[in-house]
Amino acid sequence: MAVFVSPRRPTVTGQMRIVVVADEEIDGATVVAKGPGGIVELRQEHWGGPPWAWAATVTSPTEGEWSVGLSRDAELVACRRARVRKRTGWLGTGTTIWEAERGWDRGTENLYSAWIEHLFDAPPRVRVGWRPLHEVTRDRERNLLYDHLGLGEDDAASAGALVLEADCADVPYFLRAYFAWKLRLPFQWSHCEAESAWRAPVCDQRFDNGLERTSRQELGAFQELLGRLAETVHSGNMRALPTDDAADFYPVALNRQSIRPGTVFADPYGHVLVVARWIPQTPAESGLLYAIDGNPDRSMGRKRFWRGAFPFGAPVWSGAAGFKAFRPIVKRDGELVALTNREVNVSRTYGNYSHEQYRLGADGFYARVEELINPERLTAERAFDETFDALVELVQARVRSVELGARWIAEHPGTVIEMPEGPEIFESTGPWEDYSTPARDLAMLGAFDLIEEFATGVAERPGHYALVAGEAPRAAAARIAERLARRAAETLIAYRRSDGSEQSLTIREVMDRAAAFEAAYDPNDCNELRWGAPPGSPEASTCNRHAPAAQTERMQTYRGWFERRSRPRRI
């Protein structure tokens, strides 16, 4: 258990936020604060598990010594002192980006998880998003470390507020660096050579917060570090082999203690997500595991765990996918050192290095994680509904991506976005990376297959579901097929056509256009083409923009990757 106070130096003119984190739930616990004027009444927040967190805020605290902590049944179970001043002290500059004042431990790791969960919290089954990342860190209610350093670093009204613009590979690093900078913890990252057709990513050089700063200003120095991070890291950093001690991440055991908010999920094809929240299963509702991710256009979204959004597998050329945690950094003899895999496993703080997910294989991996999300088997209907809802979320996310591309084109009249060649269409830079959708479309096509085959899976693997007693698996599968037909025909999505009008499509219509989505990822095409409008149809009549013929021909050449639902090997 650990107690934290934010900001770093509380003042009488601001707020003092108290956060307590613990490995175990403590029923009936409340945050307490006693200042020079006595005990203060506090509005309580409680969330998580594991870790569990409690928080409360004192507005305009009085000057002097405070005792803050957690109480249960009128007895303190955790406590610390905090001093409130009239004004904040000078942080100082120094010659490095920042000096690490303490190492990572169980308390700081728990706070990191609690901070991530609180930062991206939202009601279950509600679609949320932010653009860019600093939209959420500048939210005082969400960010437990808002203006922690007292520099106005998160104040949107301040000209010096931090700018956090991150794509999917940057997001976990930006979040970890931001947290470490605020709490003066050590932070490292590596330069990793990208994987090729013959080998996994190899990391050969480490950088840390001890780099010499060029900016004299604290915010400028940290902004410099973020720039260097963005230039150095890529998704391959998270796909190094599980035995690689030089990697920034290590694979964790498949349990609730290890797959906690802040844990990273790397898929074998280049995308990265950060675990944000577990929703426990109840008799009335299914459990959920949510993760947030960044997109090339610097937007942030939230995805639930399922096969369509969390592809798992480890082709040799892709390195190792799966759930991974940041490698702990400690101070030894004044130097920052990353723990080896063996040291992680024997550590009392961590002890969760594991190859379990790779031994299980893909089917075993999904079965194990689903068991964590829903310890009680779901009925076939409920399992189908969860999968179908997740598919709809994927399609709705594509609506936004396509629209952002159309807006960019409209804002740059006469501009043609250059299209890379070969496998580079999936990993590029510039406007193509920001507004094309080949990876998203490939994932969506795979999701179509999953939902179409769901009924067959019920018949072939009835033991995965809580079927009605005595019911034949084929009868249950038939009910699922009927459910798919009904829900696909009833569920609508809508996109904006070139003339500004709204076009509605049922999910059945979208799925029936699968062949069109095998070559519909070019942002130079109109929205109608990108949504597979049949040639000559009223829907297609408003199309006013076409990709260059050479790009259209290349998309036809690459169609086989999408037909096979298989991303090409990197060269």
Image (tube, helix red, strand yellow):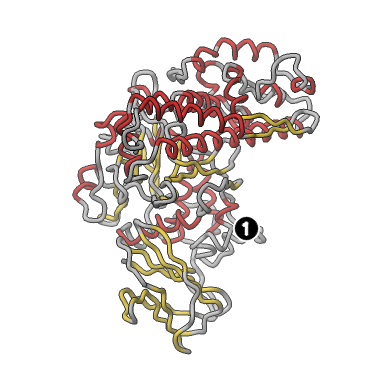
Residue 215 visible to the viewer = yes
Q: Is residue 102 left or right of residue 88?
A: left
Q: Quadrant of the C terminus?
A: top left
Q: Mark 1 sits on what residue?
A: 160
Answer with the quarter of the image where residue 419 lies: top right
Of 495 and 317, which appears nearest the observer? 495
| Residue at position x 58%, y 57% in the image | 138
Badge 1 amino acid: Gly
Q: Quadrant of the N terminus?
A: bottom left
| Residue at position x 66%, y 23% in the image | 530
**SS for dot 1:** loop
| Residue at position x 39%, y 80% in the image | 67
Q: Within 10 angstroms of label 1, few (less than 14), some, or many (20 or more) residues?
A: some
Answer with the quarter of the image where residue 381 lies: top left
Q: Is residue 392 above or below residue 121?
A: above
| Residue at position x 29%, y 42% in the image | 254
Q: List x then y, in percent, for residue 361.
A: 29, 28
Q: List x then y, in percent, for residue 529.
A: 69, 21
Q: List x then y, in percent, for residue 86.
A: 54, 81
Of 330 and 396, which appears nearest the observer? 396
Residue 234 visible to the viewer = no
In this view, the residue farthest toward the bottom is: 37
Number of numbered tags placed on the structure image: 1
Q: Is residue 273 above or below residue 58?
A: above
Q: List x then y, in percent, for residue 342.
A: 20, 43
